[in-house]
Amino acid sequence: MIGKAQLFTLCLAALMATAAAGQEAVARYRIENGAIAASLTGVPGDAARGRAIVVNRQTGLCLLCHAGPFPEERFQGTVGPDLRGVGSRLSAGEIRLRLVDSSAVNPATVMPPYHRIDGLERVAPAWRGKPAFDAQQIEDVVALLAGLKAP
Amino acid sequence: MIRQAAMAVALLATWPAAAQTDDMANPAFLWVEEGKALWSERPRPGAKSCADCHGAAETAMRGVAARHPAFDAKRGRAMLLTQRLDACRVEHQGETPFEPESRRQLGLAAYIALQSRGLPVAIAADGPLAKTVAEGRALYTRRIGQLDLSCAQCHDDLVGRRLAATAIPSGHVNAYPVYRSDWLGMGSFWRRLGNCTTGVRAEAFAPHSPEHVALESYLAARGNDLPMQAPGFRN
């Protein structure tokens, strides 16, 4: 049997663990000149893993709105800009900011914030307190997109 | 293979629009038949059917769906057509409310909505319903979910753009309840709303919740004068 005091301690510990996890869920970063210049993790992104994320319609969701140089993927979206050549239009740091929190660039954007959890309302329980991408996933996608150069 | 799939999608895109007005080709009419039977069915011996009080649906229900959601003065709140059905069941038939999205609920709603087909949507949005409509509008423009999107951002600003294979529609509710190929079944606006809340990773709204009623009231009101299409047929 668990006593009331023990139950309280357990709940408190669970709450604290949740709070700690919430703090760690999103990496710290600094925005300068419309970009996040520094890597969120210090670990270089992997473009192949980034590609797997981008074409995955459950994880990345990218191709729901964007088209890009992914010829095997049918039914790419026309909501956002085409990703072909994005690595020539934007620096890696500019791409990183647009993935992390595009509303910092354009407050009216329809681009979801992939690495922000503050200021969100009515998030489904399964996603609450979690960013859409973790910090390394952001770096992997940055590595892919920064390499999509215009011909 | 891919080419065939693309052609099938192109065909599907035009198919429901044509089939919606051909009752033999619109799968929603399987539900309508059920609703028609329910109209004159007595839930228990001695209990009243819809027809016992209202008479023929073709005359008694003409225009009713086009006027809903409507403000109910007796209850002092906005009511959806399906809430009106539940009220009748509880107060006049001694039954329990319909199970949301059940065949019987959708069937009866579809049968009643059919009696307004072609009539202009006629929501009394300036009267006591105005407050609910305004609440719905506020919800419609509020960003929600992990993806931080409002209804308006897609269904006002990006209408016609493609979200993967699907053209973003303009958020009208004059065809509900609707048969959708991607559901392989019938659903209310509430079911469709759930697809969007899931999509933006937001907490779902409960059926007949104040939020559901407000959103549907706003969408119905801004579709005033459009012809009623229910029961609709969509991809």
Image (tube, rainbow, N blue to C red):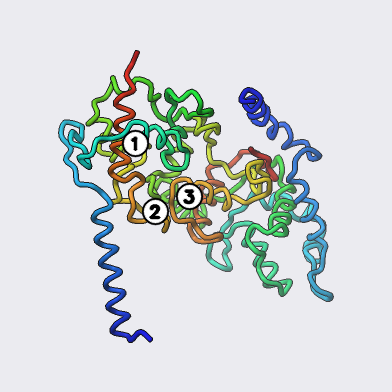
Q: Residues within 10 Å of mark 1 (few under 14, many from 20)?
A: some
Task: For mark 1, give the secondary structure.
Answer: loop
Callout 3: chain: B
* Coordinates of residue A96 in the picture (x, y in percent): 26, 34
Give the residue pinned by disc 1.
Answer: A109
Q: Is residue B234 above or below residue B7?
A: below
Q: CA distance from mark 3 to mark 2?
A: 12 Å
**For this rendering, which residue is in front, A64 or B150?**
A64
Give the residue pinned by disc 2.
Answer: A127
Q: Are marks 3 and 2 in contact (CB under 8 Å)?
A: no
Q: Residues within 10 Å of mark 2 (few under 14, many from 20)?
A: some
Residue shown at 71%/51% (left/top)? B110
Residue shown at 79%/60% (left/top)? B39
Query: Do the dots labelled 3 and 2 sit on one chain?
Result: no
Mark 2 residue type: Trp
Q: CA distance from mark 2 to mark 1?
A: 21 Å
- Of circles 2 and 1, which is in front? 2
Give the position of the N terminus of chain A as an image quadrant.
bottom left
Q: Which mark is residue B197?
A: 3
Query: Do the dots labelled 2 and 1 sit on one chain?
Result: yes
Report whether B177 appears left or right of B212.
right
**For this rendering, which residue is in front, B72 or A110?**
A110
Q: Are marks 2 and 1 in contact (CB under 8 Å)?
A: no
